Image: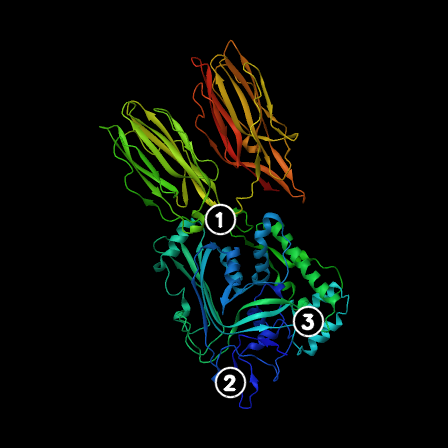
Amino acid sequence: MKSILGFIALARTCTGDTIPPPNVDAATYGYNVLLGLPPIEQRTSLIGSKLFSLTANTDISNDGFKSYHQFSDFNAQEKCNNHAVSNTVWWSTSSATLSAQATSSSKGYDFKATIGISVPVKGAELSLETTVRNALVFGNSQSSVQAFSQRNAGKTYSFDAKTHRQLYAVEIDYNSISSWTDKFKNACASLGNSPNTIEILNFFNDYGTHGLALAAFGQTCTSSIFMKSGYSMSTYYAFKSKESSYDSSFLWWSSSKHQSESNEEKEDKESGFQYSVADRRCYGEIATDSTCGGGMAGTGHNSPAIISWTYKPIWDMHVPELSQGAKNKLKSVFELFMSASVHCMETSCNGRGACAPKNDWWTHKKFTSGSIDFDATFDGNKCFCAEEYIGNKCEKRKEIPLKEKVLGGYENYWDERFQKNDGIPLCGMWSRHDNDTEDRRFKFYTCGFFESQYAEKVGNDAVTSWTNWDEEWRLECEANKVLIGVESYHSNGAEDRRWRITCRQFKDSRTDNCVGFPSTYVNHWDEMFDFTCPSGKVLTGIESVHHNGAEDRRFKFKCCSLLIHKHQDIELIKKYFWTGYYNDFDKPVTAVALIDGKKAAISGVSSYHSNHAEDRRYRFKYSTAQNMILTPYHDTQWFEYTDWDSYFKRECDKYKNRVLSAFFSYHSNGAEDRRFRFGCDAFYSVTASNKHYRWETNQCRWTNAVNYYDQSFDFECGSHEVITGIISWHNNEKEDRRFRFKCCRWEPVPQ
């Protein structure tokens, strides 16, 4: 029977006996996944006991490697997997830190940190399953410990370089092993058919939770750069992309003869931020110099380490002395640890990351009778954040990195129309004025994506309506969309331009951390201006005012960060169809947003005007939570009725996250106008799994006027937005009103 199959180099003595390759014995041990240490670091610490033995009669098959008659001649053909420098920059203690350790490729196999059991996460949290699993396997590795140390020292972003070469690989067939060690067989037999939890914990402590199903042996080297916090992702990527910014100390193995190098503190001369070159280690030794191009030097002898692997749970092994009852208990106790890991994720990492195990919970411990607090086996102060989150508790979203700003050429000549739209986020505008033509020429800055995955368009682009001559206006993208296009044409009669913008949502993104529309304009009349958004931000809005004397415009801008936001396909807000009209001409409107008898939010208003009645009819669009029930948790905020013929501005209380939920109005034939009264509510939700959410508003924006006098309109906020404010003004000659609306992104926040 074969105990080790395939992908293994061998040597034989002169008598023909098989001699295993160097260090292959490491594949015969058990490893405790719950320690958060990879196999090489567990073996270094002498953790784990031998499960089976290689004997002189063990049949080790040859899979294309050369055979040699003397052990000293062992020189298998190396297989290369040169990772070089990582493509991305990540939060120092993110899931990427774990993934960089977890996945590699060797001789056609993809070695992942499989543990042979599912992770009990649900719904949108399914994306965290890999993070939870990898945190179990690598949460306390030297690389992870270094990442937490650097993060705590203020070096919060990092990228790494890895290189490794494989000498040989083994695959273990646990159904065919006959050489189980006596000690391991006795331990299995002693569990009996119904062991208790304490007995299982002691078994895990002595023999581990898993064996190795596949193991590649060779040499691997790593190095990481940790960069000081306080800069934009664009700055970090710009630093990373300029290889001259960091010297050969990063790819240290090309010149060093040592297995490790100490950390170095450095400062980038161009950007001024500080960084560390750290986590410089090699595992394993190979006799000859590398032919892989990574510069790994030979040491004159072969002492390879386990550089990639997959696990096999002990409860899935065919060990005659291990009863089915004991196997079931081994698995169920391991599942208790998994549940505790998920609980730590939810309570300590905001449900957005995984906790590192406490490996000292196991060290030199013999468990005795008593209750076991499984929650105490994970460290809530060590969160590995999912890809899109950052922060010690994964409380913030990560920026999408943008390339440096690029200023294009002129888009127009004097008095000419232009249309700028390259499908790339705009991040600035340049302009100069000419008094002879009373017009401006324009250039625009663009900021492309470092990572092409974010450049994909989501949904339809949104194009605003045209502004009017000589008016003060504000054009603003709805929530999660950014400005990619500007169109304008000039009138020599009005000596002004009309404008409209195009906005786009990009894949896995949302807008946040916005700045702009300040109290002052970026230019004075007739002046040139050169405006760019702060580093890492893009344009989401333009505001302008015209002066008939100067025949010129002044400008303001709004800029937002683009943050990673996965699962945009999961709609949190459900919008319903337009209601019927709530009133006839001259009759009152009493609209309260209700869906299936439950209060909801108003997200759209539609209206048309009659010159005969000099009045409007109104209908509405309502929105509610998707797959959750909305419940108001404050009294309704009611405003006083507006006055006849007056300008009014009504905004729901943003501090209590109120949204528009009621629209009342009545008409006067004498004034030929309406008085209006509005109501606003705040909401919470409880899911079927008893998770509590408070619905909060953010990223609010005021629209331009959605209608001209006597015109109809069908206005609704964006897909993730609801109405939180209304502005209106009356014209006595037209006997009609124009309207503007305030839209806010509306989303549930866990409590």
Q: What element carries label 2?
A: helix
Which numbered disc, 3 or 2, marks the residue closer to the eye?
3
Residue 352, position as x, y percentages in the image = 57, 50
Q: Residue 398 carries which label?
A: 1
**What colouring method underlies this structural image?**
rainbow
Cα–Cα span, label 3 and label 2: 32 Å
Image height of 488 relative to 239, above or below = above
Q: Name the residue nearer the viewer: 320 or 535.
A: 320
Amino acid type, callout 1: Lys
Amino acid type, callout 2: Phe
Mark 1 crowd level (few <14, some 14–19, many ≥20, 10 Å Cα) = many
Q: Which mark is residue 318?
A: 3
Residue 281, position as x, y percentages in the image = 47, 68
Identify the mark nearer the N-term, 3 or 1: 3
Q: Give the position of the C terminus as an image quadrant.
A: top right
Residue 72, position as x, y percentages in the image = 49, 85
Q: Mark 2 points at which residue?
A: 71
**Can you tell which quarter of the image residue 467 is in?**
top left
Q: Name the residue nearer the viewer: 326 or 421.
A: 421
Mark 2 crowd level (few <14, some 14–19, many ≥20, 10 Å Cα) = some
Which residue is depicted at the point 52% across and 16% down?
A: 674
Which numbered disc, 1 or 2, marks the residue closer to the eye?
2
Identify the mark nearer the N-term, 1 or 2: 2
Amino acid type, callout 3: His
Q: Give the position of the N terminus as an image quadrant.
A: bottom right
